[in-house]
Image (cartoon, rainbow, N blue to C red):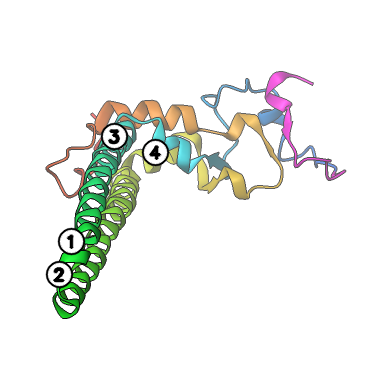
Amino acid sequence: MRAGGRLCRLAGGLGLWLLAAGLALAQDAPATGTAPVTAGTLLTLEQDRLFSESAFGKASLDRERAATLALDVENKQIEAALIAEEQDLTTRRATLPADEFAALATAFDVKVERIRSEQDAKFRDLSLMREEDRKAFFRAIVPVLGDLMGEKGAVAILEKSTVILSLTAIDVTDEAIARVNAVLPPADPGASAPPVASQP
């Protein structure tokens, strides 16, 4: 069987037989993802790879990694300061009236809880930023994927991981990445959403 006719199977195989009528042309196509496919067919695409390997996605992920590292550094600095403050409070305990120490200890506990909540919120904001970037990205590239479908004579693009069995020739992830990079700029930290991509 030619390269384009290789089958992507689940581990262990399903023992399925393919009907030749609708797949003859696709079996003769190279497994590059750029070959023409038969009219009315389906295409597959890896959404995670489309995002993470696009220029926009790479910039978004780099920005998230940098922000996460900065937040980790900030957390370590805060932790060191709180440990020092706690040790100082413990040292002063022997010289303070019980009620005064209790008030200081309570205030310290409240401070720790407030800081923990604030830092947790920052981590949640990072996760939200990542999800918003992904949503904005996929909204913006709809025209690109629509043009790709039209050129291939396809009726739909499916997420590859949800497909049980397919020909490698119908995967258009690499071609989609190249087209998206040609029309969609990298993620802009100052923008809330990318512009809708348009073909040149």
Q: CA distance from mark 1 to mark 3?
A: 54 Å
Which circle's residue, 3 or 4, is located before the other in the chain? Answer: 4
Q: Please say if the residues under marks 1 and 3 sit with CB atoms less than 8 Å apart.
A: no
Q: Residue sitting at 22 percent across and 43 percent down?
A: 77
Residue 58 percent coordinates (x, y): 33, 31
**Part of the protein shown in magenta:** 1-16
Residue 19 percent coordinates (x, y): 80, 42
The C terminus: image quadrant:
top left
The N terminus: image quadrant:
top right
Give the residue pinned by disc 4.
51
Viewer-nearest of discs 1 and 4? 1
In the rendered structure, the answer to whether residue 72 lies left or right of residue 101 reads right
Q: Please say if the residues under marks 3 and 4 sit with CB atoms less than 8 Å apart.
A: yes
Image mark for residue 56: 3
In front of the other: 47 or 87: 87
In the rendered structure, the answer to whether residue 84 lies left or right of residue 155 reads left
Q: Residues within 10 Å of mark 4 (few under 14, many from 20)?
A: many
**Residue lying farthest to the bottom in this orientation:** 99
Q: CA distance from mark 2 to mark 1?
A: 6 Å
Which circle's residue, 1 or 4, is located before the other in the chain? Answer: 4
Give the residue pinned by disc 2.
96
Residue 138 percent coordinates (x, y): 35, 47
Give the residue pinned by disc 1.
92
Task: Name the amino acid, label 3.
Answer: Phe
Q: Please say if the residues under marks 2 and 1 sit with CB atoms less than 8 Å apart.
A: yes
Q: CA distance from mark 2 to mark 3?
A: 58 Å
Task: Name the amino acid, label 1.
Answer: Arg
Residue 66 percent coordinates (x, y): 26, 35
